[in-house]
Image (cartoon, rainbow, N blue to C red):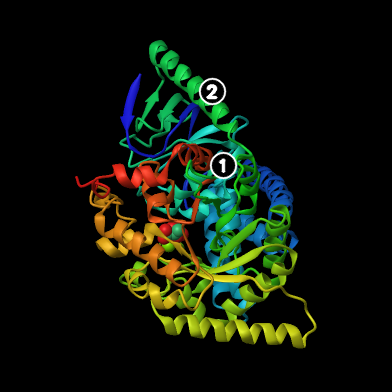
Amino acid sequence: MQVFNGKSVFGGIAIGRIYVYQKGEQQVRRTRITDIQSEKDRYRRASGTAMEQLKELYDKALNEVGEENAAVFEVHQMMLEDDDFVESVESIIETQEVNAEYAVAVTGDNFSQMFASMDDDYMRGRAADVKDISERLITVLNGGAAGGIQSEEPVIILADDLAPSETVQMDKDKVLSFVTVHGSVNSHTAILARTMGIPALIGTDIPMDESIDGKMAVVDGAGGCIYVEPDEDTMARMSGRKHQEEEQKELLLSLKGRENVTLDGQKVMLYANIGNIRDLATVLQNDAGGIGLFRSEFIYLESEDFPGEEEQFQIYRKVAETMAGKRVIIRTLDIGADKKCDYFDMEEEENPALGCRAIRICLTRPEIFKTQLRALLRASAYGNIAIMYPMITSLWEIHKIREIVEQVKEELTEQGIGYGSPLQGVMIETPAAVMISGELAKEVDFFSIGTNDLTQYTLAIDRQNPKLDDFYDSHHPAVLEMIRMVAENAHKAGIWAGICGELGADLELTRDFLAMGIDELSVSPGSILPIRKIILETDVSEYRKERRQPVVSKGK
Ligand code: PEP
Ligand code: MG
């Protein structure tokens, strides 16, 4: 048995086989071959397998993200069969007497450069598609899996690091746990693991060699370690704990249907954070009163080009309809920093977290913003949608947003297209927004505190940098005082204030948030029932009296 340690991102026990996750881009070696015909046959067979994969991907995408998004996999199928592409690969195998992987890599590079140099925008966009299919072919030729998870059974994913776009594209039914060598506990991949409610470790000192692939392992999420080929004792101990945790979960389920009200009658809204329409099942299973944060940028991250109005409208409408009148707060796109989309064509920045992200992109590229607003306004006629704007720092931004929203409404009216009147709120996730929260509160319908960024910007600590995790003190008195201040300013102006950052799920602070008068907590679905348990057991006025001093900082 070997034991490797990492940092815990989400608790729980996972037992299963390790699956070493392959990154897209791969090294290709040029080797000489003697049997040209059998190399060509090998290429043809790989092409057939890749075609099967693409058909499956098309069907999956059709179900999950609709026809418009799925179409890209049809384009890939056509490219795979394209005569020029096939002829180029076969001619390189024949004339240079080289392996198929090399011939595919060279053809892929040549074709993608050719597309990239074309004038037409659409054709230029195809460069990435050619690259994608040649990567897929090479992976098949190497006998591996392309990006996705090629396993019959659910597995423990072991990766060097995972980008949010990679995590989001994985088949969630196949993932028991995430274990990465790099990454930070505050990254979006970590947040996704929490949303899925599965044990996850980052910064794990585990070797990423192939010898570990397929080995039996146990991930102890809370304990922050992974046991590879566990001995009998460890296996028995961990299976016992897994069983206990399942029993605890059952117990919590008995809290379903109960109101979130403290012993002295203070009510709190308990909502869920989601990144995807597929998260809705867990939202309902965990009895969320609504959705407090739908990170709409994940729609963009999953796409290969800007998602259109109709596609977005269908997604927002589906969420609103599924939640059947419960509030659904959709955050406008928060691209930038660690969440990157190639097709946004953003300039490289020295400090992306302080750069052009979120509302700054929307206000400088209003055509992108307007498409999303049109979809949101239209969908709000089908349920209880609220719109939330991220990364606000100044009042003028609210005025500008309002001006654009009014323009969009006018355009919809002129076109005879129906829309609702959603509430509009802002995220409080910059110290500037906290300091002007008294003024902001007069302009919007609600506040939601993004403690992940608020902590990063208040403590001047990059939330992505794992080396600084020890300094990222989420209980820092400055952060907690800001939360209190925001709630107070919201109430003075007659609006409500919630928390949708990860701190909202910190059970050590639930009673403090109640004492501060926080009205809403939006957390990963799996955290809802444990928080409800605390709310039901708390007498807030008693707690205020007994708490002699403010919450203690976690200070290392
Ligand atoms: C936050 O910053 O707390 C937040 C909820 O937004 P995100 O984590 O997506 O930046
Ligand atoms: Mg944020």
Helix, strand or loop for disc 1: loop
Q: Are marks 1 and 2 in contact (CB under 8 Å)?
A: no
Q: Relative to 487, does residue 240 appear above or below in the rendering?
A: above
Quadrant assignment, res 10: top left
Furthest toward the left, the residue is 556
- Which residue is located at x 29 percent, y 59 percent? 481
Query: Which of 340 and 317 lies nearest the eye of the viewer?
Result: 317
Query: Which of 110 and 23 lies nearest the eye of the viewer?
Result: 23
Position of 523 compared to 507: left or right? right
Q: Quadrant of the N terminus?
A: top left
| 10 Å crowding of disc 2: few (<14), some (14-19), many (20+) | few
- Which residue is located at x 73 percent, y 51 percent? 63
Helix, strand or loop for disc 2: helix
Residue at which label 1 appears = 145
- Which residue is located at x 31 percent, y 45 percent? 545
Q: Residue 417: x percent and y percent? A: 78, 79
- Which residue is located at x 44 percent, y 46 percent? 505
Q: Relative to 255, does residue 455 appear above or below in the rendering?
A: below
- Residue 247, numbered circle: 2
Quadrant assignment, res 223: top left
Query: Which of 511 and 48 lies nearest the eye of the viewer?
Result: 511
